[in-house]
Image (spheres, rainbow, N blue to C red):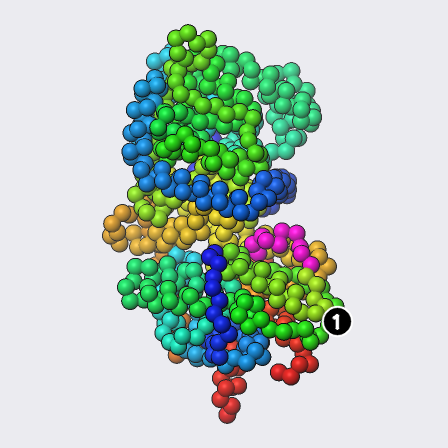
Amino acid sequence: MQARNYPPKPKDVYLFGTCLIDLFVPQAGMDAVRLLEREGLTVHFPQDQSCCGQPAYTSGDAEAARKVARAQMKLFAQDWPVIVPSGSCAGMMREHWPKLFADDAAYGPQATALAERVFELSEFLVHVLQPDYSAARAEPVKVALHTSCSARREMGTRVHGLSLLASLPGVEVVEHVRESECCGFGGTFSLRHPDISGAIVRDKVDSIAGTGCQRFITADCGCMLNISTAAQHRSVAVAGTHMASFVCERLTGESA
Amino acid sequence: MSKHPMQFVPTADFKERARGALDDDKLRKSFRGAMDFLQAKRRNQFSDEHERESLRDLGSAIRKYALARLPDLLEELESKLTRNGIQVHWAENAEEANAIVLDIMRRNQARRMIKGKSMASEEIELNHYLAEHGMECIESDMGEYIVQLAGEKPSHIVMPAIHKNKADVAKLFEENIPDTPYTEDVDELIQTGRRALRRHFMEADVGLSGVNFAVAETGTLWLIENEGNGRLSTTVPPVHVAIMGMEKVVAKLEHVVPLVSLLTRSATGQAVTTYFNLISSPRRSGELDGPREVHLVLLDNGRSQAYADEQLRSTLQCIRCGACMNHCPVYGRIGGHAYGTTYPGPIGKILSPHLLGLDEAGDLPFASTLCGACSEVCPVRIPIPDLLIRLRNEAKRNPNETVATPLRGQGAKHSAAERVVWQFWSGAFKSPKAWKALRWGATRLRAFTPGAQAGWTQHRTPLKPASRSLHDMLKDRDQPE
């Protein structure tokens, strides 16, 4: 991960909603929009968007990934930042699209240029918008934080998540043992190697439950769905909330 | 020596073995404890983040520098070693390497070999081969010795017997070493092992060792170790045979210093090892000890394939510290034996396809979440997840497709059915209309979401789409009807 230069606060941004949020946790996308608008931005959501191509890319079908990625690229024609409320998808667009099109004279430069303006939501909030949440609800709450591995390593999302949560009054982040370890999702890995994936997520659920927190906050939907449904399967009272939704929840009472 | 020498069928039964390991509570506890311990030891050694990252930069640059000049450095190494009196042998594959070692033994009327730790010798299954030819091989690294007594293979490249607890070792020693009562006292067990091995050092005709680094400019073989068995194996018997993968050469003596620091701190969390052996010649006239012959076997065994590809070449930067496996969420849960390959864990997943072919490596490149814990700790910055993705692409490639430098076993995981799935997937996601229709179907028909979803619901509740997609919610908001 390279240290990056952040732009000044823009007037307009794009939202790339990601396919998992789109289908399974759309409220997280709505909450991301709300947080961006709260800072005075106009959020543009190209209706033709779908997926970053990560599932095919990590499964070894680069051509299928390229087809889908190409279809997204043309949707972000203006020079506005592209905000992604999911760390691993942001990492895919920022780190892997340029590699995917490295040998492509037409799309290569486009992918590299676009990668420069892809930001994970919490990263963008912390570094560019610097919101003031001091008037948010103050009653104490303890939560655990889970950061997707690729997001942490490619986008520095853990630091941004901690920083965002620290800016919320009354929120205490409880560190769990092996917080930095993978949750076992890994996209199609969870389907291809269900036993190993199941063993890893089991430990992750226990690790979070061990803090006494029933909630964990995460900026990545794949991990969130993996951990939450694995906890539910064993009737362990642990459930994930998307970072954007959690921040919005703390801002309740503020005029939207 | 070993009662049941194991010929591993590489990875055919990976999933089944992994399942077995996951169900073995004792094994999982052993590995979890060991991995936590090793992670903490490494962390303590690298408390200064800036120093660590600078050293990793340097280590990576040194290894890249050496690989960029590999053919020249190997020739220089050969000429310097030869000048120093060390005989150099080139082995293209395991059969050749084994035959070279056997030939050296026969020419010296040797029957008994004492072995220091060598993963290259594990790779070519030397013990098994020599046993078939009537030779006796004794492993003298304590971990390797334990594994040999158990008739197993190492489960870790640095700590071969990490899957064994002290009760396992106590039982093995009681059963295999005469006059040894059962004890779980670790110091006593170590002393028992030392006593048993001492005799073998004195009786051996040939000592075999691995090599950590070979220095081209000086013709020096570096061997680092903690137990002293490496020094005994390379100095007591009259003949010493060293074996190394051909990528382990470095250009200059000074290049070894940062690499050794990275190696010991990453591997076992030690600032230095107890022993440094710098071997530069056989016994010279007037010297009182040392072997009268020293040989080096340079092993290719598939490494050329990785070398030939600019991206895959970084696989050969590896200095075999094992930090990638110590930090891997998959290795930590299934242990080394489940992989079925000489090199387990993340490095095994990227190296084995070259040593064995993508067909033999089976599902290994796919058995990773790509979390990147391995590359984060790799002392020479091998981009392991990127290499796994590349190998996945090569494994999925149509076997009939002609590419400039095909990998052995290319297309082994090609499946027409899976290809259709991804074609359907890309068709759906590249077309806004198709994705819209899918969204519509998934959200409106969510009541019909299947309760059993492939591997997902084995350990999780089913995924159920929301009643409205983000697309719909934002469309309604922006263009109210």
Residue A94 position within the rendered picture, expressed as x and y whole percent measured from the top left: 43, 63
Amino acid marked by disc 1: Glu
Camera-nearest residue between B60 and B126: B60
Which secondary structure is most common in the magenta stretch? loop
Side of B199 where B111 appears, left or right: left
Residue A227, picture quadrant: bottom right
Q: SS at mark 1?
A: loop
Q: Is residue B149 visible?
A: no
Let me know if residue B388 is in the magenta part.
no
Q: In the rendered structure, does residue A180 fall within the stretch colored magenta?
A: yes
- Say which of A198 and A165 sits in front: A165
Which chain letter matches label 1?
A: A
Q: Determine the residue positioned at 35% across, 44% down.
A: B313
Q: Position of residue A159 (x, y in %)?
A: 58, 60
| Residue displayed at 67% across by 27% down | B186
Kindly identify which residue carries mark 1: A139
Q: In this view, does B186 lie above or below A21?
A: above
Q: Is residue B205 above or below residue B384?
A: above
Residue A198 is situated, as x and y percent measured from the top left of the image, at 57, 54
Q: Residue at x 42, y 66 (%)?
A: A116
Residue under the point 57% across and 34% down: B270
Magenta region: which residues?
A174-183
- The answer to whether any part of residue B355 appears in the image is yes
Label 1 Cα crowd, 10 Å radius (few <14 / some 14-19 / many 20+)? few
Residue A201, compared with residue B340, is above or below; it is: below
Farthest top residue? B286
- Residue nearest the viewer, comparing B395 with A249: A249
- Which of these two is toward me, A5 or A80? A5
Q: Position of residue B215 (x, y in %)?
A: 38, 29
In the displayed structure, would residue B295 be above or below residue B479?
above
Farthest front residue in view: A8
